Amino acid sequence: MRAAVLHEFKKPLALEDVPRPVIGESDLLIQLEACGICHSDLHLADGDWPQLARITKKPLILGHEIAGRVAQKGEDVRDFQIGERVGVPWIHSTCGQCEFCREGNENLCARQQITGVTVDGGFAEFVKAPASHSIRIPEALSPVEAAPLFCAGVTVYRALRRAQISPGQRLAIFGIGGLGHLAVQIARHLGAEITAVDICEDKLELARSLGAASALNAASPTVVKEIRSKGGVHVALVTSAAKAAYDMAFSCLRPTGTLLVVGLPSQDLCFPAILMAGAEVRIQATAVGTRKDLREVLALAVDGKIRCHVNTYPLEDSNEALEQLRHARVSGRIVLTFP
């Protein structure tokens, strides 16, 4: 099968013929129809995160927003049939036994395997995945529509759901890219009053079209003043991987507000303790989502509540797609497609 393979950090992916995966008795072999490209793929390819660089297998096939059809199944698999459309998320498998798995927080399982990090992912014509952690995709969704929901969609959904936003509360979303434009749609569904913040005017226009009440260019020196003049925001969601976005978002919070950490800068974040205490703000992070979260996101998409804007590339152009992402030339999400 053809695959885009990472051999060394900061080097282009190699388009190669590699052996097709051999499945076990509880696995699925999935023929790819689409695979989203996440900003995390770029960080992984460049070795930007020391914590993940240490556990990244090499050579590695990246990709954790997978949509395809069951091509083969292990002898113990009963829940899927050949030809059914399924998806594979960031969380490849979990132990099911630890306290986090038992509490419904399987995304925090210390023994989890990660698709496209510790095991091969979806920048390939076929991928192997455990049936237990593969998710059935409704036929009402195309593979290109569904693939980005397996990371971008579920991550912002879990972040906003855990923030317990009430209708009418003020929410600022910093970064209207692949995650941010989905966050606007989910927040609109939750009834929030949304302010979109980005440095690209086309992305701000997209946010307005999706339901943002206001859109502010982060390059303006008056962004914080404008948001604080309205009382500050109850919740600030940062999808950007820029540390400056977090500094701005923190300053936009009202007292008792919540800063949602979704975008992952390579630098450490730092906020003055006296300001945190004086305003009783909360800082809350999100690690992708559970299988339950993902099924809820897919249901929202089927109901027409959210729709991912995508740019498609063939597998052979995966390096070009990563370059477009590296230079912030993407509105929405990039999805690799397969014949």
Image (cartoon, rainbow, N blue to C red):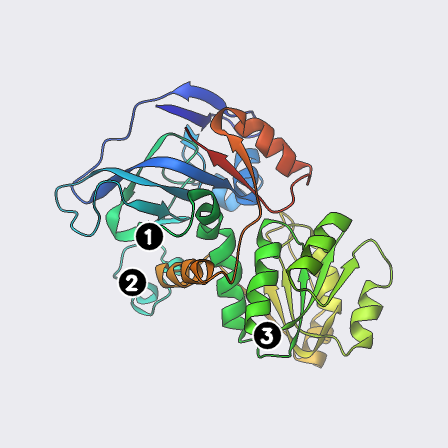
Residue named by callout 2: 98
- Amino acid type at circle 2 is Cys
Q: Position of residue 248 (x, y in %)?
A: 75, 62
Q: Looking at the image, which residue sits at the far left?
A: 75
Instruction: Residue at 57%, 79% (x, y): give it.
Output: 166
Q: Which label sits on residue 254?
A: none
Q: Position of residue 139 (x, y in %)?
A: 35, 50
Q: Are discs 3 and 2 less than 8 Å apart at CB?
A: no
SS class of the residue under badge 2? loop
SS class of the residue under badge 1? loop
- The first of marks 1 and 2 along the sequence is 2
Residue named by callout 3: 191
Q: Looking at the image, which residue sits at the far right?
A: 221
Can residue 200 be seen here?
no
SS class of the residue under badge 3? loop
Residue 330: image quadrant is top right
Mark 3–mark 1 Cα distance, whole angstroms, equals 37 Å
Residue named by callout 1: 111
- Amino acid type at circle 1 is Arg
